[in-house]
Amino acid sequence: MIHVWDLPPRQLQETRVPSGTARQGVERWFRRLDPPQGTQICASRPVHGTKLISTTPATGDQDHLRTVIWSDPTIPDRTEALLGSGPDPTPWLLNGGRVLREAGATVIAIPCNTAHAFVPRIAGHVGLPIVHMIGEVAGHLSALTPRVHTAGLLATTGTVRAGLYQEWLDRAGIRLVLPEAASQHGEVMAAIRAVKAGARDDTTTDLLARAARRLTEQGAQTVIAGCTEIPLGLPADAVDVPLVDPALVLARALVRRAGAGWDGYCTHHVT
Protein backbone atom coordinates (compact mmCIF):
# COMPACT_ATOMS: atom_id res chain seq x y z
CA MET A 1 0.00 0.00 0.00
CA ILE A 2 1.39 3.37 -0.97
CA HIS A 3 0.17 6.38 0.95
CA VAL A 4 -0.81 9.32 -1.18
CA TRP A 5 -2.85 12.46 -1.03
CA ASP A 6 -5.15 12.20 -4.03
CA LEU A 7 -8.05 14.64 -3.98
CA PRO A 8 -10.26 15.75 -6.90
CA PRO A 9 -8.38 18.30 -9.02
CA ARG A 10 -9.63 21.86 -8.61
CA GLN A 11 -8.94 24.96 -10.59
CA LEU A 12 -5.56 26.12 -9.35
CA GLN A 13 -5.60 29.74 -8.32
CA GLU A 14 -2.83 32.01 -9.53
CA THR A 15 -0.42 32.37 -6.63
CA ARG A 16 1.72 35.46 -6.31
CA VAL A 17 5.19 34.56 -5.09
CA PRO A 18 8.24 36.83 -5.11
CA SER A 19 9.82 35.99 -8.44
CA GLY A 20 13.17 36.78 -9.94
CA THR A 21 14.10 36.76 -13.59
CA ALA A 22 15.49 33.23 -13.34
CA ARG A 23 12.27 31.83 -11.84
CA GLN A 24 10.11 33.53 -14.46
CA GLY A 25 12.32 32.24 -17.24
CA VAL A 26 12.13 28.67 -15.97
CA GLU A 27 8.34 28.86 -15.66
CA ARG A 28 8.00 30.21 -19.19
CA TRP A 29 10.21 27.39 -20.43
CA PHE A 30 8.10 24.78 -18.61
CA ARG A 31 4.91 26.18 -20.15
CA ARG A 32 6.28 25.62 -23.65
CA LEU A 33 6.71 21.91 -23.03
CA ASP A 34 4.22 19.39 -24.33
CA PRO A 35 3.39 17.04 -21.43
CA PRO A 36 5.00 13.66 -22.20
CA GLN A 37 3.08 10.42 -22.11
CA GLY A 38 3.50 8.08 -19.18
CA THR A 39 4.28 8.64 -15.56
CA GLN A 40 6.37 11.60 -14.53
CA ILE A 41 7.53 11.98 -10.97
CA CYS A 42 8.47 15.31 -9.50
CA ALA A 43 11.00 15.21 -6.73
CA SER A 44 13.98 17.10 -5.47
CA ARG A 45 17.57 15.99 -5.41
CA PRO A 46 17.60 13.83 -2.25
CA VAL A 47 15.11 11.51 -3.96
CA HIS A 48 16.09 11.98 -7.60
CA GLY A 49 19.82 11.53 -6.92
CA THR A 50 21.43 8.30 -5.84
CA LYS A 51 18.41 7.16 -3.82
CA LEU A 52 15.92 7.02 -6.67
CA ILE A 53 18.49 5.82 -9.17
CA SER A 54 19.91 3.12 -6.89
CA THR A 55 16.47 1.70 -6.10
CA THR A 56 15.37 1.49 -9.75
CA PRO A 57 15.88 -1.95 -11.35
CA ALA A 58 17.49 -0.57 -14.49
CA THR A 59 20.06 -2.01 -16.87
CA GLY A 60 20.44 1.16 -18.94
CA ASP A 61 19.57 4.84 -19.11
CA GLN A 62 16.21 4.18 -20.76
CA ASP A 63 15.00 2.04 -17.84
CA HIS A 64 15.03 4.88 -15.32
CA LEU A 65 12.03 6.96 -14.30
CA ARG A 66 11.37 10.27 -15.98
CA THR A 67 11.55 13.03 -13.40
CA VAL A 68 10.87 16.74 -13.15
CA ILE A 69 12.70 18.58 -10.38
CA TRP A 70 11.54 21.85 -8.87
CA SER A 71 14.10 23.12 -6.36
CA ASP A 72 13.13 26.51 -4.93
CA PRO A 73 15.48 27.99 -2.32
CA THR A 74 13.14 30.94 -1.77
CA ILE A 75 10.50 28.82 0.00
CA PRO A 76 10.28 30.20 3.55
CA ASP A 77 11.59 28.07 6.39
CA ARG A 78 8.94 25.51 7.25
CA THR A 79 9.93 25.18 10.89
CA GLU A 80 9.80 28.93 11.44
CA ALA A 81 6.33 28.99 9.89
CA LEU A 82 5.10 26.21 12.17
CA LEU A 83 6.54 27.95 15.22
CA GLY A 84 4.87 31.22 14.25
CA SER A 85 8.10 33.10 13.56
CA GLY A 86 8.10 33.07 9.76
CA PRO A 87 5.83 33.38 6.71
CA ASP A 88 3.54 30.61 5.53
CA PRO A 89 5.25 28.60 2.74
CA THR A 90 1.95 27.37 1.30
CA PRO A 91 1.90 29.84 -1.66
CA TRP A 92 5.40 28.76 -2.68
CA LEU A 93 4.45 25.08 -2.46
CA LEU A 94 1.34 25.70 -4.55
CA ASN A 95 3.44 27.55 -7.10
CA GLY A 96 5.86 24.63 -7.32
CA GLY A 97 3.00 22.19 -7.75
CA ARG A 98 1.58 24.28 -10.58
CA VAL A 99 4.93 24.43 -12.37
CA LEU A 100 5.41 20.67 -12.05
CA ARG A 101 1.92 19.89 -13.26
CA GLU A 102 2.38 22.11 -16.31
CA ALA A 103 5.70 20.36 -16.98
CA GLY A 104 3.87 17.03 -17.27
CA ALA A 105 4.38 15.46 -13.86
CA THR A 106 1.67 12.99 -12.85
CA VAL A 107 2.65 12.38 -9.23
CA ILE A 108 4.45 14.52 -6.66
CA ALA A 109 7.04 13.47 -4.10
CA ILE A 110 8.12 15.97 -1.44
CA PRO A 111 11.33 14.77 0.25
CA CYS A 112 11.07 17.38 3.01
CA ASN A 113 9.63 16.01 6.23
CA THR A 114 8.57 19.36 7.67
CA ALA A 115 6.83 20.39 4.44
CA HIS A 116 4.36 17.55 5.00
CA ALA A 117 2.68 19.71 7.64
CA PHE A 118 1.42 21.80 4.71
CA VAL A 119 0.35 18.92 2.46
CA PRO A 120 -3.31 19.11 3.59
CA ARG A 121 -3.37 22.76 2.48
CA ILE A 122 -2.09 22.09 -1.04
CA ALA A 123 -3.33 18.58 -1.83
CA GLY A 124 -6.68 19.66 -3.22
CA HIS A 125 -5.19 22.41 -5.36
CA VAL A 126 -2.16 20.97 -7.15
CA GLY A 127 -4.21 18.63 -9.32
CA LEU A 128 -1.81 15.72 -8.73
CA PRO A 129 -1.53 12.97 -6.11
CA ILE A 130 1.20 13.45 -3.51
CA VAL A 131 3.01 10.38 -2.19
CA HIS A 132 3.11 10.88 1.57
CA MET A 133 6.64 10.26 2.80
CA ILE A 134 5.75 10.03 6.48
CA GLY A 135 2.94 7.58 5.77
CA GLU A 136 5.43 5.50 3.81
CA VAL A 137 7.83 5.45 6.75
CA ALA A 138 5.05 4.27 9.07
CA GLY A 139 4.21 1.51 6.61
CA HIS A 140 7.88 0.55 6.32
CA LEU A 141 8.30 0.28 10.09
CA SER A 142 5.09 -1.74 10.42
CA ALA A 143 6.40 -4.31 7.95
CA LEU A 144 9.77 -4.88 9.64
CA THR A 145 10.62 -8.19 11.26
CA PRO A 146 11.12 -8.44 14.18
CA ARG A 147 8.34 -5.98 14.88
CA VAL A 148 9.30 -2.47 15.91
CA HIS A 149 7.42 -1.39 19.03
CA THR A 150 9.34 1.83 19.76
CA ALA A 151 10.97 4.25 17.33
CA GLY A 152 13.02 7.36 17.98
CA LEU A 153 12.81 10.53 15.90
CA LEU A 154 15.50 13.02 14.95
CA ALA A 155 13.79 15.86 13.09
CA THR A 156 13.31 19.60 12.99
CA THR A 157 11.47 21.22 15.84
CA GLY A 158 8.73 22.06 13.36
CA THR A 159 8.22 18.41 12.45
CA VAL A 160 8.17 17.45 16.12
CA ARG A 161 5.78 20.22 17.16
CA ALA A 162 3.42 19.47 14.26
CA GLY A 163 3.12 15.87 15.47
CA LEU A 164 3.59 14.49 11.96
CA TYR A 165 5.30 11.25 12.93
CA GLN A 166 3.39 10.95 16.19
CA GLU A 167 0.10 10.77 14.28
CA TRP A 168 1.21 8.20 11.73
CA LEU A 169 3.10 5.93 14.14
CA ASP A 170 0.23 6.01 16.61
CA ARG A 171 -2.00 4.65 13.84
CA ALA A 172 0.54 1.88 13.30
CA GLY A 173 0.71 1.03 17.00
CA ILE A 174 4.34 2.16 17.33
CA ARG A 175 5.47 4.23 20.30
CA LEU A 176 7.54 7.29 19.39
CA VAL A 177 10.26 8.71 21.61
CA LEU A 178 11.58 12.23 21.10
CA PRO A 179 14.68 14.13 22.22
CA GLU A 180 14.37 16.20 25.36
CA ALA A 181 14.27 19.96 24.80
CA ALA A 182 17.98 20.51 25.46
CA SER A 183 18.98 17.76 23.04
CA GLN A 184 16.51 18.93 20.40
CA HIS A 185 17.89 22.47 20.47
CA GLY A 186 21.56 21.90 21.24
CA GLU A 187 22.19 18.72 19.27
CA VAL A 188 19.56 18.02 16.62
CA MET A 189 18.80 21.55 15.42
CA ALA A 190 22.43 22.63 15.81
CA ALA A 191 23.51 19.76 13.56
CA ILE A 192 20.77 20.41 11.00
CA ARG A 193 21.79 24.06 10.73
CA ALA A 194 25.43 23.06 10.39
CA VAL A 195 24.70 20.66 7.52
CA LYS A 196 22.57 23.30 5.79
CA ALA A 197 25.57 25.63 6.04
CA GLY A 198 27.81 23.03 4.39
CA ALA A 199 29.47 21.60 7.51
CA ARG A 200 29.62 17.81 7.50
CA ASP A 201 32.33 16.82 9.93
CA ASP A 202 32.98 14.84 13.10
CA THR A 203 31.40 17.55 15.25
CA THR A 204 28.10 17.28 13.37
CA THR A 205 28.19 13.50 13.52
CA ASP A 206 28.93 13.55 17.25
CA LEU A 207 25.96 15.86 17.92
CA LEU A 208 23.53 13.62 16.06
CA ALA A 209 25.04 10.39 17.42
CA ARG A 210 24.61 11.67 20.98
CA ALA A 211 21.00 12.61 20.27
CA ALA A 212 20.36 9.18 18.75
CA ARG A 213 21.96 7.46 21.73
CA ARG A 214 19.60 9.30 24.08
CA LEU A 215 16.69 7.88 22.08
CA THR A 216 17.97 4.30 22.21
CA GLU A 217 18.40 4.71 25.98
CA GLN A 218 14.65 5.43 26.05
CA GLY A 219 13.99 2.14 24.30
CA ALA A 220 14.06 3.09 20.61
CA GLN A 221 14.62 0.01 18.46
CA THR A 222 15.18 2.16 15.38
CA VAL A 223 15.86 5.84 14.76
CA ILE A 224 14.11 7.84 12.05
CA ALA A 225 16.37 10.37 10.34
CA GLY A 226 13.38 12.69 9.93
CA CYS A 227 15.08 15.62 8.22
CA THR A 228 16.84 15.62 4.86
CA GLU A 229 20.06 16.89 6.43
CA ILE A 230 20.30 14.22 9.11
CA PRO A 231 21.44 11.28 6.92
CA LEU A 232 24.06 13.63 5.48
CA GLY A 233 25.52 14.25 8.94
CA LEU A 234 24.82 10.91 10.61
CA PRO A 235 26.23 7.73 9.03
CA ALA A 236 24.21 4.61 9.73
CA ASP A 237 27.17 2.98 11.48
CA ALA A 238 27.24 5.81 14.04
CA VAL A 239 23.97 4.53 15.52
CA ASP A 240 23.56 1.29 17.47
CA VAL A 241 20.13 0.54 15.97
CA PRO A 242 18.85 0.69 12.37
CA LEU A 243 18.69 4.23 10.98
CA VAL A 244 15.67 4.82 8.73
CA ASP A 245 16.10 7.37 5.92
CA PRO A 246 12.63 8.65 4.90
CA ALA A 247 13.90 9.91 1.54
CA LEU A 248 15.10 6.41 0.69
CA VAL A 249 11.75 4.95 1.78
CA LEU A 250 10.03 7.51 -0.45
CA ALA A 251 12.25 6.65 -3.41
CA ARG A 252 11.40 2.97 -3.04
CA ALA A 253 7.69 3.80 -2.95
CA LEU A 254 7.99 5.74 -6.20
CA VAL A 255 9.83 2.87 -7.86
CA ARG A 256 7.16 0.41 -6.69
CA ARG A 257 4.49 2.64 -8.19
CA ALA A 258 6.27 2.80 -11.51
CA GLY A 259 6.94 -0.94 -11.48
CA ALA A 260 3.24 -1.60 -10.95
CA GLY A 261 2.50 0.27 -14.17
CA TRP A 262 0.75 3.10 -12.40
CA ASP A 263 -0.92 5.45 -14.88
CA GLY A 264 -1.23 8.49 -12.65
CA TYR A 265 -4.42 7.56 -10.81
CA CYS A 266 -4.29 6.58 -7.14
CA THR A 267 -6.65 4.35 -5.23
CA HIS A 268 -5.13 4.81 -1.77
CA HIS A 269 -6.02 7.96 0.09
CA VAL A 270 -4.76 9.72 3.17
CA THR A 271 -7.50 11.26 5.29
Image (spheres, grey):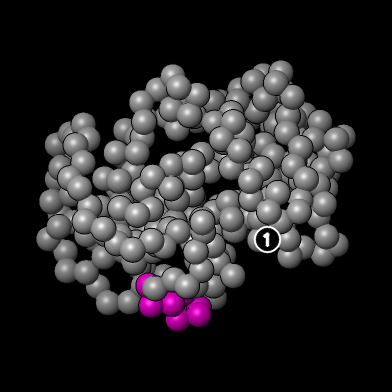
Bounds of the magenta segment:
258-264
Q: Nearer the viewer, residue 144 or 166?
A: 166
Quarter location, residue 55: bottom right
Note whether 113 is above or below 203 in the view shown.
below
Query: Where is the N terminus found, in terms of image quarters?
Result: bottom right
Q: Is residue 147 left or right of residue 111?
A: right
Note whether 25 is above or below 257 in the view shown.
above
Q: Is residue 176 left or right of residue 124?
A: right
Note whether 260 is above or below 55 in the view shown.
below
Task: Report x, y in % for residue 43.
Answer: 41, 55
* Secondary structure mostly seen in the magenta stretch: loop
Quarter location, residue 65: bottom left
Amino acid type assigned to the residue bearing label 1 in the image: His
The residue that appears at 36% across and 31% down in the rendered structure is 88
Task: Report x, y in % for residue 179.
Answer: 73, 29
Mark 1 Cα-neighbour bin, 10 Å: few <14, some 14–19, many ≥20: some
Q: Which residue is mark 1?
A: 140
Residue furthest bottom as drawn:
261
The residue that appears at 63% across and 55% down in the rendered structure is 137
Note whether 138 is above or below 234 in the view shown.
below
The residue that appears at 44% across and 71% down in the rendered structure is 266
Task: Report x, y in % for residue 51.
Answer: 54, 58
Visible in this render: residue 251?
no
Magenta stretch contains residue 261: yes
